[in-house]
Image: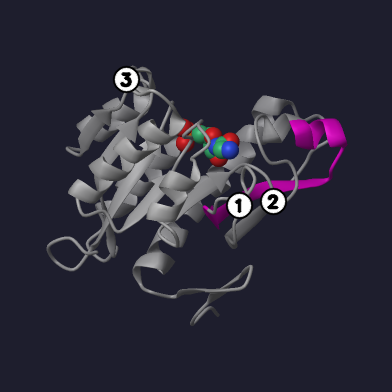
Amino acid sequence: MTAAGGRLRVGVLVSGRGSNLQALLEASTRADYPAQVVVVISDRERAAALDRARAAGVEALFVNPKDFVDREAFDLALVRELTARRVGLVCSAGFMRILSPAFTRAFAGRAINIHPSLLPAFPGLHAQRQALDHGVKVAGATVHFLDDGAVDSGPIILQASVPVQPDDTEDTLSARILAEEHRLYPEAVRLFAEGRLAVVGRRVVVRGQR
Ligand code: GAR
């Protein structure tokens, strides 16, 4: 679904700092960018990401998981809020909850996530620490479609790699990966908005990629 001016309407799910949200908000300000963040929803009332949304003049919504009997009821509330705002793409950006099939089915093919590893390596929490513990030489970030499989599964849209340095800590590696995330996420949203992503089995084909 597109906003006035033909731009794709994007809803972003957050839980914390919101630096990936910020990258999407900044991309939205460019006149030639084909997508626009129209609502930001957090499961945490004090998430810094909500302040970033407000500062950008974007609707910021806190949906309290404690107001719902179970995960599915909470997820259906998210679906209602997003649908009411005619969101055409949902971006999970540091949203630290597992979305149930109630959500992923409602937004099948229209919900994506960013994760700080080269999936399928190191899904779940503390991906950067997992990479260091494993002693890998290359780490990175992945943007993928959400499906109702395991955590951080779903067809991969874009990936970027970074080297792991011998003296890396979780913080230094996370910062190097994050810089790639901030480049990758707006690019994936742009490709989606331009209708250039086709899912063929488990593969995402990017049309017109040089
Ligand atoms: C990012 O590194 C994102 O990839 C990660 O949380 C961080 C959120 O940072 N997400 C996951 O680990 C999801 N499994 P941000 O709030 O500054 O965007």
- Quadrant hosting residue 43: top left
Cα distance in 3D space between marks 1 and 3: 32 Å
Query: Which badge, 2 or 3, comes first in the chain's sequence?
Result: 3
Could you tell me which secondary element the residue under label 2 belongs to? loop
Q: Which residue is drawn at 39% across and 64% down?
A: 190
The residue tagged 3 is 67
Q: Count numbered badges in the picture.
A: 3
Q: Quarter of the image containing the N terminus?
A: bottom left
Query: Where is residue 125 shown, x and y percent of the image?
Result: 65, 30
Q: Spot the residue most to the left.
A: 4
Q: Nearer the viewer, residue 58 or 101?
A: 101
Q: Which residue is drawn at 45% across and 40% down?
A: 93
Which kind of residue does numbered mark 3 sit on?
Asp
Query: Where is residue 131 shown, x and y percent of the image?
Result: 78, 37
Could you tell me which secondary element the residue under label 1 belongs to? strand
Q: Crowdedness of circle 1 by 10 Å Cα count: few (<14), some, many (20+)?
A: many
Q: Quarter of the image containing the C terminus?
A: bottom right
Q: Crowdedness of circle 3 by 10 Å Cα count: few (<14), some, many (20+)?
A: few
Give yes or no for residue 200 being in the magenta stretch: no
Where residue 142 is drawn, which disc sits there? Answer: 1
Cα distance in 3D space between marks 2 and 1: 6 Å
Which kind of residue does numbered mark 2 sit on?
Leu
The range drawn in magenta is 130-146
Q: Note whether 189 is above or below 150 in the view shown.
A: below
Q: Which residue is drawn at 81% across and 29% down?
A: 167
Q: Which residue is drawn at 24% across and 41% down?
A: 81
Where residue 119 is drawn, which disc sits there? Answer: 2
The reply to whether dot 2 and dot 1 touch (C-beta < 8 Å) is yes
Query: Where is residue 104 shown, x and y percent of the image?
Result: 46, 50
Query: Which badge, 2 or 1, comes first in the chain's sequence?
Result: 2
Q: Note whether 47 is above or below 139 in the view shown.
A: above
Cα distance in 3D space between marks 2 and 3: 33 Å
